[in-house]
Amino acid sequence: MFFLIQKIFSGYLCLWLNSPKCKNHADKVALGNAQKTVTLGALGAFPVAFPRNLEEQKNILEYFDGYEKQIINKQTQLEKLKLLKLGLMSDLLTGKVRVKI
């Protein structure tokens, strides 16, 4: 059997394997009931859509990395705001801060 080896960035492959399309395919070929498993043979037969141009793969990775960093920053801001809210609520409920009516 002859295999044509293409060049692909490992980060791009990881991105593809975690995509909803690939996860749906994994659900279809997984074996087992309690804990489904994708066999190595089935994994080797997964369809992988990737640009042959390595520069384009790199651009796609950078694009998704930028969004991932934005998501992490927003989650951090949200956690800080939640802590601030809890602190303010605690101050109000314990009477440390008076509420004017």
Image (cartoon, rainbow, N blue to C red):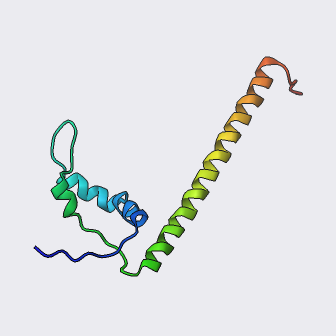
Nearer to us in this view, 44 or 85: 44
The answer to whether 27 appears left or right of 75 in the picture is: left
Residue 80 sits in quarter: top right
Q: Residue at x 69, y 34 (%)?
A: 83
Instruction: Name the spot of residue 76 as percent of width and height, x first.
Output: 64, 46
**Residue 96 coordinates in the image, percent (x, y):** 85, 21
How far from the left and from the top, in percent, is residue 18? 37, 57
Image coordinates of residue 50 in percent, x first then y, are 35, 74
Residue 89 vs residue 22: left or right? right
Look at 34% across and 59% down and name the residue there: 17
Q: Could you tell me which residue is drawn at 74 percent across and 35 percent down? A: 84
Which residue, as the protein is rendered here, is positioned at the far top? 94
Residue 66 against residue 76 in the figure, above or below: below
Give above or below for 59 relative to 19: below
Q: Is residue 79 left or right of residue 5?
A: right
Can you say which quadrant of the picture contains the N terminus? bottom left
Kindly indicate the quadrant of the structure image that contains residue 4: bottom left
Residue found farthest to the bottom: 53
Quarter occupied by the C terminus:
top right
